[in-house]
Image: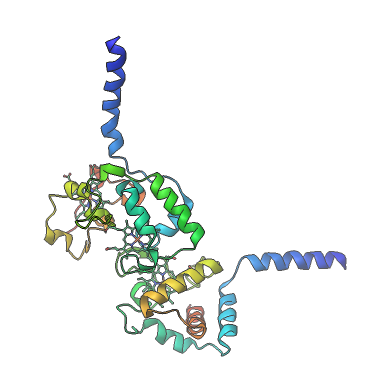
Amino acid sequence: MTIRIILPLLLTALALPARADSYALPKNPAFEEECASCHIAYPPQMLHADSWREMMGGLSRHFGSDASLDEKRRSAITDFLVAHSGGRKTGDTRDARGKPLLRITETARFNRKHVEIDAATWKRASIKSPANCTACHAQAAAGDYNERSIRIPK
Amino acid sequence: MRYLLIVAAVLFAAGARAEVPRDFLSRFEKEAGVAASAERGARFFSTRQGGEWSCASCHTEKPTQAGRHAKTEKAITPLAPAANAERFTDAAKVDKWFRRNCNDTLNRLCSAQEKADVMAWLLSLK
């Protein structure tokens, strides 16, 4: 009797950590075409659904760039991002004023994974910005952030 | 005669779907009502107009070469049709990027004449 309850629990526990770190990019042609032209496709799993909704509502002023889309595409991509969003796992998802965070690089999870990197490193000419994932994660464009492919440039 | 008409209709339909770079030059020239100038286009492309960027900031001053996004560093394939057969073959894409990039560099849309001039210059590059 107990084994029937414990076994599934154990199996679930074993499966969880492996799932938590998967940022493989779900296939979606509209997302690939529209959200990977100015930078790599950032994994939908790395932001909360509220953050994606907020971002997708202000594309004409997207981090200082005009990334505006026609309404049909905008709403299709919003649905895709929300469906694959990271939920609570991203850690703190709102800023001090309660607004959804728009940058992956401001989430608690991102900061936890990068505690070892100091401010001067982020500013190196070869890196420029924490948002430039590819500078250190060679396979970032494919959604692969595995430790095997990390190299911090000089 | 009837066959000829059908063939002509099919050819016309096929032509209307896929654009070629020259189509955009004619379209913008017609909208502007004046002839395009490649020389003006070259100047427009590499001059900052009040903003932080010119077109060349991301597409380089020699757009037969690959460029690089001035903020994100992402590589951008060459903009000149001579170096990149995919450029200026899709009206929705061309209109979308003229809208966005003109807004980012000029804080306004480009005029038809500015677009015609840029097209004339890009088409003159070998």
Taking B90 as reference, is B50 above or below it? below
Q: Position of B31 compared to A31: left or right?
A: right
Image quadrant where residue A66 sits: bottom left
Q: Position of A41 compared to A95: left or right?
A: right
- The residue depicted at 35 percent of the width and 79 percent of the height is B54
- The residue depicted at 35 percent of the width and 84 percent of the height is B47
Check the image and name the residue furthest to the right. B1
Q: Nearer the viewer, residue B76 or B65?
A: B76
Check the image and name the residue furthest to the top. A1
For residue B89, say whether it is visible.
no
Horizontal and vertical percent position of residue B99: 45, 73
Image quadrant where residue B21 sits: bottom right
Horizontal and vertical percent position of residue A150: 23, 48
Horizontal and vertical percent position of residue A7: 29, 17
- The residue depicted at 12 percent of the width and 59 percent of the height is A119
Taking A53 as reference, is B87 above or below it? below
Taking A36 as reference, is A24 above or below it? above
Quadrant placement of the N terminus of chain B: bottom right
Taking B70 as reference, is A77 above or below it? above
For residue A99, say whether it is visible.
yes
Q: Nearer the viewer, residue A19 or A143?
A: A19
Check the image and name the residue furthest to the front. A97
Horizontal and vertical percent position of residue A137: 26, 51
